[in-house]
Image (tube, grey):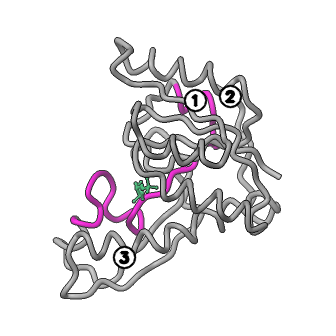
Amino acid sequence: MIHLAVLGSGRGSNFEAIQKAIIAGELEAKVSVVISDKQDAPILEKAQSYGIPAIAVPRDNFDTRQAHEKEIVALLQNYTIDYIVLAGYMRILTSYFIRQFPNRILNIHPSLLPAFKGLHAQKQALEYGVKVSGATVHLVNEEVDGGRILGQKCVPVYDSDTEESLSQRILAVEHQLFPEVLQKISEGSLKIPMEVKA
Ligand code: GRF
């Protein structure tokens, strides 16, 4: 059993997929807390509906990125946490935060990394004309979308696709991929080296 903190900025569909996998007994994990940088993010309401502590830490309340992250780190210390799951967290973490949790932060990205890092990955894929895209779960390091890949799932890209239709197809596999990778970590079939905190 692994304990998770989920950080998200928006609708929280990946969080919900993880929570549903836990409830279905497919993922041996517990979400200890959900934190958002947006006061009114739907992910917070979703967490509350599952009885999970949900906390807003609005970015605008802090002078610097590091002050904002320090508040989140302080909050996380109140919970049992093995991994931090970024599920649509739309801020780039500073090295300060990343070094607090070396090899303990996972992100999901809507492309087959290392292709199409950064924002609007689905649009980038369409513009490039790739015929296959997908989703990637990876460790977070100091290079944006650059950490070690833990799992991927692919989807076809059709000539008729729009950014919206491709995003929906990728999102459907994201919802399978994140719980699957987390379960592999939980059962020990996917080993992540423990790094010493910097
Ligand atoms: C997903 O497309 C994910 O790949 C990206 O942000 C989106 C989050 O969606 N990092 P949701 O909030 O989990 O619904």
- Mark found first going from the N terminus, 1 or 2: 1
Q: CA distance from mark 1 to mark 2?
A: 6 Å
Q: Residue 179: image x %, image y %? A: 64, 64
Looking at the picture, tell me which residue is in the foreground, 55 or 67.
Answer: 55
Q: Residue 195: image x %, image y %? A: 70, 38
Q: Secondary structure at mark 3?
A: strand
Q: Amino acid at mark 2?
A: Lys
Instruction: Give the side of residue 134 with respect to residue 49, left or right.
Output: left
In the rendered image, which quarter contains the C terminus? top right
Q: Mark 3 highlights which residue?
A: 133
Q: Mark 1 highlights which residue?
A: 99
Q: Residue at x 22, y 65 (%)?
A: 124
Decide: is 181 above or below 58.
below
Whether the residue under disc 1 has CB within 8 Å of ligand 1: no
Q: Residues within 10 Å of mark 2 (few under 14, many from 20)?
A: few
The quarter of the displayed image where residue 126 is located: bottom left
Q: Residue at x 40, y 46 (%)?
A: 10
Magenta span: 97-123
Q: CA distance from mark 1 to mark 3?
A: 31 Å
> Can residue 23 be seen at all in this image of the molecule?
yes
